[in-house]
Amino acid sequence: MNKKLKIAIIGSRGYPYVYSGYETLVKELSERLVEKGYSVRVYCHSSLFKKKPRHVNGIELVYTPSIETKFLSQIINSFFSFIHVCFSKVDVVFVVNSANGPFGILTRIFKKKTCINVDGLEWLRPKWKGLGSVYFKFSSIMSTYFFDKIITDSYEMNKIYKNNFKQKSDVIAYGSTMVKTNSSKIINNLKLSKNEFYLIVGRLIPDNNSKLIINGFLKSKSKKKLVIVGDVPYNDRYSMSVKKIKSDKIIFTGYINCQDKLSQLYKNCYCYLHGHEYGGTNPTMINALDLNCHIMALETRFNAEMLEKKETIFFKKNVFSISESINSFEKKYYSINEANKGYKIPKKYNWNQIVNEYIEIFHELFYRDKVR
C-alpha cells in the first residue's frame, strides 16, 4: 500500500487554470498529491493556454485539442485526452464531469483503472436544455456502467445515483479556497464598508438565479448594496440580461480569481446570498461557511445538507420570497449573529482529509485485482 501511484486527471480545463469547482478540485488535489510523492498528469485544453510548459509545480501537463464553445469544448478535449491516456502508462485515471461518461468505454477496453466525479444534476440545468439535457442524462448513466468507481460530492447526490441509477457511490466533498487576510484593498476600491453589502458569488447562469435574487433584493427594504462576483466566458443572453440591471445599489465585479480579494469580500459582507439550484457540495458556499459568513440560501435539499448546522434563512424561487427573506434577515440579524458565533466548518470540507479520501480510492482501485 506504500506505492506512489501515477494518477492521470481528465475533464477539467486544465492546470493551473481555475474557472469552476472542477478546476479548483484538480488544483488542490494535484498539488497535494505531488507533495505526498505521487506522480500526477493533468490534461489541459490546448486553446486556453498561450504558454504550454510540460511541468508546473511538479505536475505533468498534457495539452490536447479543444474548440472553446459552450457545448463542445469539453467533449472534444476529453475524446483526445482519453485516447492519449489509453496508450499511456498510468496507474489510475481520475475523471471529472459526468459529460465524460461515454468515454469510459475506451478506458474499459484498455483495462485502465478509473473513477469519476459526476458532480451535479447537469441534465436539469437550463443551459443544457434540449439535446444537451438528453446527452447529460445519457452520459451520467454511462458513467455508472463504464467506470470502476463513482464519486459524488454530497449525501443527497449519493441518494440520487442510488435511487435513479441503482449505483453506489463514494461521497467526497470539496474544500474551501479562502485565505487569511487583513487587507481591505478591494473593499476600499469598490467604496464599500464592512457589513454594508450582500454578496453573490457564482457564474451568471440561470440555475444560479442571480437575476432573481437581484430583483428580489431591489424590491426589499434593505438600504445596503449588493455585490455580484462572476460572469461566463461566452456570449450569453441570460448573463447579458443580468448585467443590464441598473441600480446604484448593485455592483458587478466580473471574475475575481485572486483568492485574497475574494476572501476580503466574503469576510466583510453582511450576508452571502446563495441561489445555486442544482448540484451537491457547492464551492462558493464552502467558502462562506469557512469564514462563518451569514448565509441566505435557496431552499433545496443540497443547500439544506450543507447548512444543517448553520443558522440560516431559506428562500423560495420567487422575487417575493427573496425580498421578504431579506427583510426578515435584517430584523433577525443580531439573533442570527449570536447563534452563528460558535460555528465551525465540518471536517469533511478540509482539503487534507479530502485528498486522503481520494488516495484511499486510488489505492483500492490499483490493488483490487492484485489481491485476488
Image: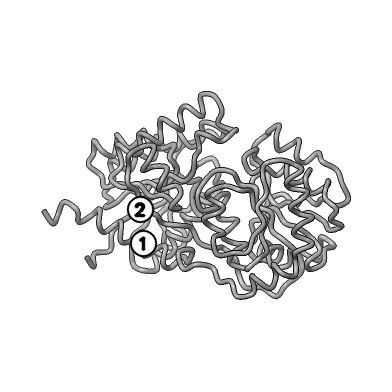
Q: Which residue is the site of mark 2?
A: 170
Q: Residue at x 54, y 24 (%)?
A: 130
Q: Residues within 10 Å of mark 2 (few under 14, many from 20)?
A: some
Q: Secondary structure at mark 2?
A: strand
Q: Residue at x 34, y 60 (%)?
A: 39
Could you say where residue 62 lies in the image, as x and y percent from the top left? Answer: 42, 47
Q: Which residue is the site of mark 1?
A: 357
Q: Name the one closer to the observer, 333 or 244.
A: 333
Q: Is residue 117 visible?
A: yes
Q: Residue at x 72, y 72 (%)?
A: 183
Could you say where residue 163 lies in the image, as x and y percent from the top left? Answer: 38, 40
Could you tell which of marks 1 and 2 lies nearer the N-terminus? Answer: 2
In the drawing, what numbered circle is on residue 331? none
Could you say where residue 101 lies in the image, as x and y percent from the top left? Answer: 38, 36
Q: Name the one closer to the observer, 101 or 50.
A: 101
Could you say where residue 32 lies in the image, as x and y percent from the top left? Answer: 42, 65
At label 2, the amino acid type is Asp
At label 1, the amino acid type is Glu
Which color scheme did the rendering employ for the protein?
one colour
Q: Residues within 10 Å of mark 1 (few under 14, many from 20)?
A: some
Question: Residue 291 vs residue 370: left or right?
Answer: right
Q: Secondary structure at mark 1?
A: helix
